[in-house]
Image (tube, coloured by chain):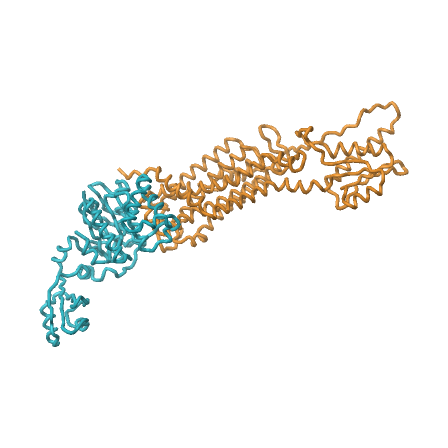
Chain colours: A cyan, B orange
Amino acid sequence: MTLEIDRVTKRFGRTVALDQLAFSVPDGRIFGFLGANGAGKTTTMRICLGILRADEGEVRWGGVPSTDLPRRTFGYLPEERGLYPRLTVIDQLVYFASLYGERPADARANALGWLDRFRIPDLAERRAEELSKGNQQKVQFIAAILHAPDVLLMDEPFTGLDPVNLALLRDAFIELRDAGRTIVFSTHQMEVAEALCESLVIVDHGRLVAAGTVPELKRSSRARTVRLGIEGEIAPTWLASIDGVAAVRPGAGFAEIELMAGVEPRDILAATLERGALVSRFEVAEPSLEAIFVELVGRPSDVIEEPVDQEDAA
Amino acid sequence: MARHDPLFPNAGTVARREYSERVRSKLYRISTIVLMALAVGVAMTPIVLRYFDQASVRQIRVVAEEDRLAQGIMATAEGVMNLPPPGVDRRRWKAPYQIARELDRNVALQALADGRIDAIIEVVRQPDRQLAVTYRTLGPADGVRSQLAGFAALSLGILDWTASLPKGSELGAFRTPTFTTESLVAPTEGGRQVDAVVVASRGFLGTVFIILMFITILIYGMWVATGVATEKSSRVMELMISAASPRQLLVGKVVGIGGAGLTQYIAIAVPVMLVLAFQEQIAGAILGSGQAGLPTGGLTIGLIAAYGLFFLLGFALFALIYAAVGSFVSRPDDLQTLSLPLSLVAMGGYLSALLVLLGGGTGTLARIASLVPPFSPFAMLARLMVSDVHPLEVVLSVVILLVTIAGVAVVTVRVYATGVLLYGQRPGLRQFIAAARRTS
């Protein structure tokens, strides 16, 4: 079984939200769907779900067009979180699962199990409006998976979570993957994507920019990263002023330097030594996913693009 | 092959949630109790008014020097003023007036001044033998009762005149003639002319029903629009629209909220109907006598059923449109402006129905209004209340309404499916039309 996005085009008025977008997601994988705001991620997910119809192309799961599949094939966590504020957590979880055809008693038992798993069993009888944003997010995640969908579409599932909850959700992802679910998620948090994705795509302005596993993308990247330690200096910010340096990020006892295209690591080392600095560490590292993203898209992932006619066509 | 999204069970699941959320709310319960009390109060008003009114003239004293005149006026007044209404069980019926003779005029006047009696009928034979009858009350005299006393005086005059005829002229005992009114142009029911009191009563009830229908359709319609707008603003719509089809969500919402509205309506209507159905008994228990011509006479099961039918159809039509409107706003606060044109359309239906009521349910305009949605639920009900409508016209009106509702439902589902995903834009007529023409 494969989720195929087959040359999908979607226009909103004169704006082209998706332009012949094509990629496929193998069964039972955690798949990253990366792109800046306005790149077409949400539109793609909505087309997968059948909420929007593609102007051209189609989405297939196991060779069957997604618009022909039962709704329970997919589980969806929208980017904009929302629950019924006055309904108790357990009631809305049972309600959503019922819409997907689950028996209320089964849904209830299953929901209580997941609430326990996410360390919030005491919130079952509380109204959603009484919950913190992080807990609301966990409840909505449970709502998306209770009916055991084959494919999980998660729009920015990690946004706003503290490190503890982020780890809980990451573990849940792995558990679901191990249970045979296919998980497609979008995120701005490149370090999360790098740690979790088995393969990914990067889209920009509705077009595919790159696809592959993280090692494949790193191998194909022209981006260069150098880790440089300087004795007696914790934050050598002056490194940013060296010609050929694109960005400097502080590390543990070193600075991580992104190089501009065509610049060699030895040029940076030479420039540093010329300034009389005592170099304690010099290491040519693989580029980060963030660096690859900037290289391919031309801007960081959290830069907001002009929205298209249909809000959230991101 | 397209995705199979049957209406049920999802529409039922949505309807149940919508219904239970509304009926569980404190505001719903309080408003139901308050409205129920108000409605029962209104239904009881005629009886309560009669209760207070019954004490205005009850005790009447007759003052006359001649025994024959005193007996005569007592007999005629008894016959005219205590005439039992038609259809009343005479054994259980209690006369509204107690008429007795008072020999001492001054005692009678003092009793009237003290408020112990309500009126005096004084008969005096003048020197030219003409009778002078005075109906005396403490405050302003009630027109109807004065008229009845006048009839009694006239009857006394006839009696006195017949008594003065030569001996041997046998005329028999005096009997009060029966008195009814008839009109050449009046509604009929089953070929029988409908009583004028019933016509007036139905006019009153028709106004009450039309106002009730107008208010409830607006309120429950706004519930639907607010429900959709709230789901959209709380962003739960994103989750809903992926779990169920727009058709399932829309039908579920309209049915659920309509059910909550219907429950409230039944909770209000049942006690009112009971009061109306047993008004004679209640009036009898409170007033101590059979009461005819109470303003709610003429209410039939057929009219109540017609109200239920046209209320449901009218609600379905307006609720669908309200749902479409609700799907196009980003916040419930924006609904006020957008729902105004719709309120004006409902107002048009309401006013057309009032015109139908005033015109007696006849005329070309009334006929057209009773067939054309969205006016027909109001106008046809009004026609049924005050006139004789051919059953085929009722069937035609219902069929046209059903077809219109089906057409509006198709358009609304399209508008809803597009509208619920639009945020941060001020919806205009162009967007509505574009959404309605869209097939997905």
User: Which image quarter holds the N terminus of chain B?
Assistant: top left
Work out which residue is located at the far right of the displayed protein and give it. B127
Left or right: A266, with B118 as reference point: left
The C terminus of chain B is located in which quarter?
Answer: top left
At x 79%, y 44%, the residue is B112
Lateral position of residue B419 relative to residue B91, left or right: left
Considering only vertical position in the picture, is B29 above or below B402? Answer: below
Which one is nearer the viewer's eye here, B218 or B262?
B262
Q: Where is residue A124 in the image (x, y as percent from the top left)?
A: 34, 48
Q: In which quarter of the image is residue A256?
A: bottom left
Left/right of residue A105 with respect to residue B207 in the rendered view? left
Asked whether residue B183 is in view, the answer is: yes
Q: Position of residue B379 (x, y in %)?
A: 52, 40
Which of A243/B388 is in front?
Answer: A243
Image: B437 above or below A218:
above
Q: In the current view of this chain or complex, which residue is farthest to the bottom?
A: A276
| Residue B433 visible to the viewer | no
Picture coordinates of residue B235, whole percent (x, y) = 35, 51
Q: Where is residue B129 in the image (x, y as percent from the top left)?
A: 88, 36
- Above or below, comparing residue A275 to residue A31 in the picture: below
